[in-house]
Image: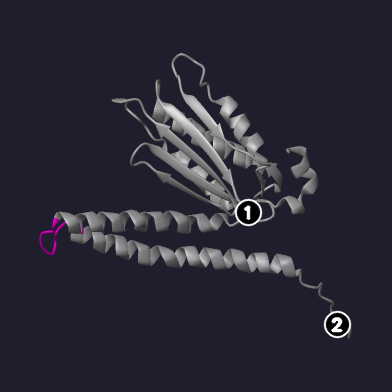
Amino acid sequence: MERELTPPIDASKAIRQVQSHWLSGLIHELGGPLQVARGYARLILEEREGPLTSTQRRYLNAVLENIAKIGTLSRELQYFPSEDTLALDRVSLRMVLDKAVRAIPVSSPQNSIRIVEDSGGALLVLGDSDQLGIAVQDLLSVAAEFAGPGGEVEISVREDTEKIALRILASARPNSAAKIRRPELLNACKTWRLHGGSASVDEGDGFHVLCELPRFRSFECGEVASAYR
């Protein structure tokens, strides 16, 4: 009797399946402890066990805020990059930024926002040009909306041996009703992290965004780097 031959296992496909199941399980397991921690913190804030001092209340609010951030990041695990998630190529962040800046109507009388750019070098990263472009445009649009007429948006880009840092600082005109659009911010920050970088938003004094991406070294892409020198 002839034995039925089975095709060999595709190792790369198999490990992707394992990664997918592992991530799904991890996301599910993280949800329970975070929900419990959030619940107990809220019970204490409701003073079920006695009154709180202003300092204790401030600490507990900080705990809840960070639990919410952990929950958001854990849900992002399901977007772990795969072969069909990003169209990766060498991307000039300078060109992406210039295109996004041109899309903001800074010259209109209703929106007299001054944008200051401080960038140099090739600013080369490995990423999806379209997705990075959308993320930068969203960040600048939110910053422009925050600044409002008479406000100011400042853009600064720094490049070192390991990373490229993009800072966006928006200052609103005194007594303006500044608004922050959450969905655009969340999606833009998620795109940055999806590219192996980091993103943070500070809404304390003004509107400050710091985004960092790994630098794509010039010796790894000399022909592209030379084109932008």
Q: Secondary structure at mark 1?
A: loop
Q: Closer to the camera, 172 or 141?
A: 172
Farthest bottom residue in view:
1
Q: Nearer the viewer, mark 1 or mark 2?
A: 1
Residue 155: give x, y in percent of width and height.
51, 35
Q: On the image, which quarter does residue 11 sit in?
A: bottom right
Give the magenta range: 45-53
Q: On the image, which quarter does residue 82 sit in?
A: bottom right
Residue 188: give x, y in percent of width and height.
52, 42
Residue type pointed to by label 1: Thr
Q: Closer to the camera, 76 or 224?
A: 224
Q: Which residue is mark 1?
A: 161
Which residue is found at the position 56% from the left and 68% from the top?
22
Q: Which mark is residue 3?
A: 2
Please indicate whether residue 111 sits to the left or right of residue 55 in the image. Answer: right
Q: Secondary structure at mark 2?
A: loop
Please indicate whether residue 60 sits to the left or right of residue 165 in the image. Answer: left
Q: Residues within 10 Å of mark 1 (few under 14, many from 20)?
A: few
Q: Quadrant of the N terminus?
A: bottom right
Q: Quadrant of the C terminus?
A: top right
